[in-house]
Amino acid sequence: MSTLEALVLTVQDGDEELSVETARQAINEGVSVPAIVDGLTVGMRDVGDRFARQEIFLPEMMLAARAMQMVMGELEPELAKSASAAHKRGVIVIGTVEGDMHEIGKDIAMTMLKVAGFEVYDLGANVNALSFVRKAEEYHADIIGASALMTTTMPNQKEIVDILAAKGLRGKYHVILGGAPVTSEWVAEAGADSFGENAGIAVKILEQVMAAKAR
């Protein structure tokens, strides 16, 4: 078993101390930050699927999420090195919409976006729609990323688009939606531009968006 595979398993098991230790080992062995994040993304998706099938329950999922957050913190110094070496691709404000406290998916996307060279401003969780717009204006963003992990909070993604339209700002920003219940049909209904089925896909979409904008 590789160190990366061992790391994924320890995170899934929710062992914070061992997860951090294994993450350090992976870094020391020269495993790249994107490879670590990719592996953990797949691992956490599996945790979410097992939770949906009721093979594990909320306490186990929360332990895995906490271990994931601890590892992300350990990756920050390496992430900073990668980001400083990368060409700046664009500016994104990203958060989880009002009424929704879930941050793991958002945090994974943020990590991968930073690795790819994006300047990322984290708005956190439970962010109201107007705050997304205000912060996008404040930070001179190119992209607004809005995550919703519950069907009951998805309408708050649409509210961001509605506010942009009401303020005459809709054409100024690429709005990307994320979260387990989000579909391409919902993106069209909400009037957004795209959705990231997972963090890796989101990065590829936004790289293409910024490349097209630069032409």
Image (spheres, grey):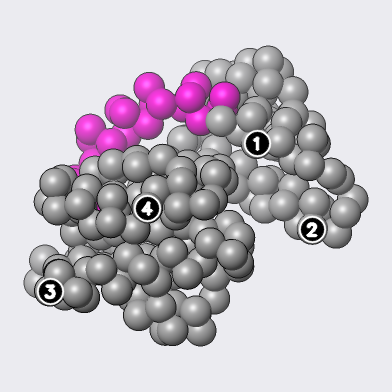
Question: Between marks 1 and 2, how big is the CA–CA gap?
Answer: 15 Å
Residue at the (52%, 52%) spot, across then down: 99
Residue 40 or residue 145, whichever sits in front:
145
Residue 8, image x, y percentages: 69, 36
Q: Which mark is residue 52?
A: 2
Nearer the N terminus, badge 1 or badge 4? 1
First in sequence: mark 3 vs mark 1 = 1
List x then y, in percent, for residue 81.
30, 28
The N terminus - image quarter: top right
Please state which amino acid type lies under the numbered disc 3. Gly
User: How much space separates mark 3 and mark 4, taking CA atoms?
Assistant: 19 Å
x%, y% of residue 83? Answer: 28, 36
For residue 5, what is the image quadrant? top right
| Label ID, residue 128 | 4
- Find the distance from the CA under tag 3 to the CA under tag 1: 38 Å
Q: Type of residue at label 2?
A: Ala
Q: Residues within 10 Å of mark 3 (few under 14, many from 20)?
A: few
Quick one: label 3 or label 2, which is nearer the N terminus?
Answer: 2
Q: Is 214 a magenta residue? A: no
Magenta residue span = 70-92
For the residue pair 211 and 28, the one nearer the viewer reads as: 211
